[in-house]
Image (cartoon, coloured by chain):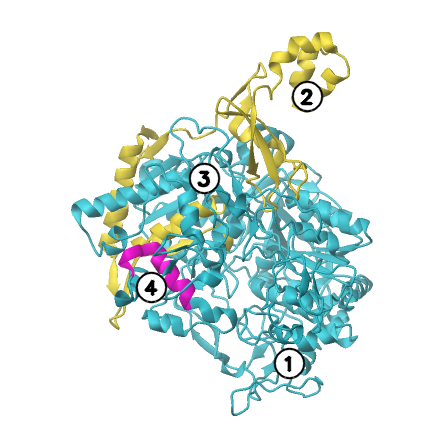
Chain colours: A yellow, B cyan
Amino acid sequence: MEVTRRQFLKVSGTAAAATTLYGIGFREVAHGTYRRFRLHYAHEVTTICPFCSVGCGIICHVREGQVVNTEGDPDHPINEGALCSKGSSLLNMAYVYDEKGKPVPNPSRVTQVLYRRPGGADWETVDWDWALRTIAARIKKTRDDTFITQNSQGVPVNRTPAIAWLGSAMCNNEENYLFHKMTRSLGLVNIDHCARL
Amino acid sequence: MTNHWIDYQHSDVMMNIGLNTAENHPVSMKWIQKAKDRGGKLICVDPRFTRTAAMSDLYVPIRPGTNLAFLNGMIQYALENDLVHHEYLINYTNAAYLVNEAYHFEDGMFSGARLMDDGIGGEKVVYDRTTWSYQSDEAGQVLSDETLEDPRCVYQLMKQHFRRYDLQTVSEIIGCPLETLQACAALFCSTGKPEKAGNIMYAMGITQFTHGAENVRAIAILQAILGNMGRPGGGVNAQRGQSNVQGSTDMAMLYHIIPGYMPVPSESLHPTLEAYHATSPGGYWANRPKFMNSLLKAFWGEHATPGNDYAYDYLPKIDKERSHIATSKYMGDGEIKGMVCWADNPAVGGPTAARKRKNSAKLDWLVSVDIFENETATFWKEPGVNPEEIDTEVFLLPAALHMERDGSISNSGRWIQWRYAAGTPPGDCHSDLWIVDRLFRAVRDAYQVDGGVFPDPILKMNWDYGEDASSARVAMEINGYDTRTGELLTSFAQLQDDGSTAAGCWIYAGYYANEEEPACQRRIRETEGVGNHPEWAYAWPINRRILYNRCSADPAGNSWNPDLPLFQWNGSGWNRYDVPDFNAALLPEESARNAFIMTGEGRARLFSNGMVEGPFPEHYEPWESPLANRVSSVQFNPCSTVWYPDDRADYASGAFPLVATTYRLSEHYQTGMMTRNMPWLVETMPELFVEISPTLAADHGLVSGDQVVVSSQRGEFQAPVCVTPRVKSFQAGGKTIEMVGILWHWGYAGLSKGPVTNDVAPSIGDANTTIPEYKAFLCQIRKVV
């Protein structure tokens, strides 16, 4: 099978391959692929891998608000540039490649606020404002209907046993802190997450 | 982890038990390899010959659910052959302390056992722990015998307790050849030599048992008697499964704690703030009132005053167990009406998951926040379910990816590292921070407008993070500040109990002490040192990289290993490569008396009253087991709550003769919700399978690729088998025991679909933590023809 330069780049799909081939003298052909160099005009933003807890550093290459490439951070003292199968696929969570090899947003992403009414067979799309107001009303009703201010000994207990909140080890520290603050302010006691699984 | 990933490189012997580092934490293998390159040895203890086993110097097969017998055997071997680190033992542990004369142990039970109502219609053992205590003189001083000869000293009681775990007995329990076990014990216990460091790494293959916490405790005891705690290359190193499960635990997304590992107020133990403070343990925990009052100030700001006990009553007080398994049961009982499931997928990840999905239909409402459609949010779409019969309202809120939002996460080594938002979230997606902020404000608005029951904790909550919530502002609150000046704190030592300081999570003090250049954003690699990289990110507590590090040196201040000094006394001070976990202003002999500053004794507890099942770890079989307990007549952990008695298979019936265990693949992650929607990973590992041995395959006439139904007392699923010599039967208790290895990444939503295998796992948990026993239960397989 004859593979053209363009196809090869598409198949290999890494910036490293592009730079290496450019470097070893395919100058004429490389000119034709110059605009396709993935990191061109991209700036670097560092992140930490969202999968296991090793805490590997990853560099995101960003162009016009879009992540165009992710790769292991060679300066990071733990992973020193290395990533596993999941970490090295990070970009794929955001983008998949279409038949022409062009990155398109991962079609499995949930990108709208979805609502399923009682007995409903499918999702309905709603807006944030409605969803937030409606969820707040549900939380308030359940809390107010079940709130216990004192136990039988007269000890103030200020809790609702009727709402559970799970999550999450996939969220940042600051997010979890706000979860905790919010749940305790509501009087929730059924608080847990996958750390107990 | 007491240590951190890079520190693995300093280990002389590494024991990988109840985890598969090469598969599930692949990049960290580089540091294990580095240790091996320096002559270090790797032991892999696992029911299967895993990828880590393939990298090991010694592979130790073990029947699922018998880790404690194995670990007790290691302890016994060290005691029997006098391989313990004596100077460490006497100075840094409670080995010499004398124990209450009334303490005793007989046939699997410790003194103080009482059969009590378990609150759900059954009974369990709840110990009266008063005899699990020390002898003291009239002045309250604990009695000790540094010769370790007094028959009531901890050391002698240990010898008595662990005597039953000779390697021959252990070999028969765990199904490992005696010679392999001897080689393992000799190799690992060689780290009892003062200059040697041994590292024990573990994960869910240690914790997911009815006696999981005791497994961890046995590891800690073994490491303490060998003198491996607080040292480079040593430690008890829990490899956590998720990128921020350390941080989410620190932030207390758990029913029993509030941020910084303080207990959640309990209606019986802590009716008032005074009562709460009075239960502060000793050691550094004596400062807990400062941490607690500062947390209340962070939560309720100016409304938290000395006059109202810093708004202590705004916090709910707990009545009973509210763990994952318990909550799921209460949902089935109708007590729970609404649930928020934030980036969590119990419909696949929970034990006996089908029951969870069924119970979800009893909810009035369910909110799920996620990046893909998960099975929990779509329980009403599961094949075979009629959505018309389900009245639950469901909201699915679209979240941003990790690389689309900023904030910090904490890795297993407690390194708090900052992530920056790289891309813009698509469509209506928002960061979890934005969503929770808006949701709280919506609830607050509802109470402001309509009033409601006890609205004060909501209306008076200190909650202002900007129009679009800023993670930096939240971080500064977690870090802590002076309430008079607003100045950020650099250490939890600055916290006060008089309302002059506020801090959301005391152990994080210092991580965001500088608004311009917060420590958790630092990226400076060390040029000299032992791999601690103190200026890379920030490790809690107080940027300490190795916990209990006073123990890295002898009482006189000389490093146990002169070639690898973490701390070395130079006659007037310490030469050091870490932040001291002790009072460095004292002379070495003085700080040596308080080497474990978090315990009241200042010493590691080989004997402790902190566990519900006993002061020493004791082997019990899993809830479902093919064998009778070999060491006592108590079959399984007598302190575990049996939530669903009918869920237990009777081995004698012969219906479920195989042992099942569950585990993961490198290419997928947890419930698969993320990775099953990533085409590259789906292509590399496209479908579910179960692993069986060639002998079991022959018994059932199976070859790789054949479909089987795997069933347990609780449910069943269908999957292809992979017949592999990596799985072997065990010879234990005079029987041949076959094992089925089950992956659990699949579900009915997403790009790659498959059955939910946790439907067969039992909803019984560890007696201390209620972590479910996913790793050892009974099952059967049948060929699909």
The span picked out in magenta is: B289-304
| Circle 3 Cα neighbour tier, 10 Å, few/some/many (<14 / 14–19 / ≥20) | many
* Chief secondary structure of the magenta portion: helix
Q: Rounded to the nearest whole Å, what is the CA distance between mark 1 and mark 3? A: 50 Å
- Residue matched to label 2: A12
Q: Secondary structure at mark 3?
A: loop
Quarter of the picture containing the N terminus of chain B is: bottom right
- Residue matched to label 4: B317
- Residue matched to label 1: B154
Whether residue A162 is visible: no
Q: Rounded to the nearest whole Å, what is the CA distance between mark 1 and mark 2? A: 63 Å
The chain to which mark 1 is attached is: B
| Circle 2 Cα neighbour tier, 10 Å, few/some/many (<14 / 14–19 / ≥20) | few
Of mark 4 and mark 3, the one earlier in the sequence is: 4
Q: Rounded to the nearest whole Å, what is the CA distance between mark 4 and mark 3? A: 32 Å
**Nearer the observer, B661 or B6:** B6
Is B293 colored magenta in this rendering? yes
Please state which amino acid type lies under the numbered disc 2: Ser
| Farthest residue, direction left | B450
Q: Are marks 1 and 2 on the same chain?
A: no
Tell me: B288 left or right of B42: left
Quarter of the picture containing the C terminus of chain B is: top right
Q: Nearer the viewer, mark 2 or mark 3?
A: 2
Please state which amino acid type lies under the numbered disc 4: Lys
Please state which amino acid type lies under the numbered disc 3: Glu
Task: Name the residue located 59 percent from the left edge and 63 percent from the top edge.
Answer: B622
**Nearer the observer, B60 or B388:** B60
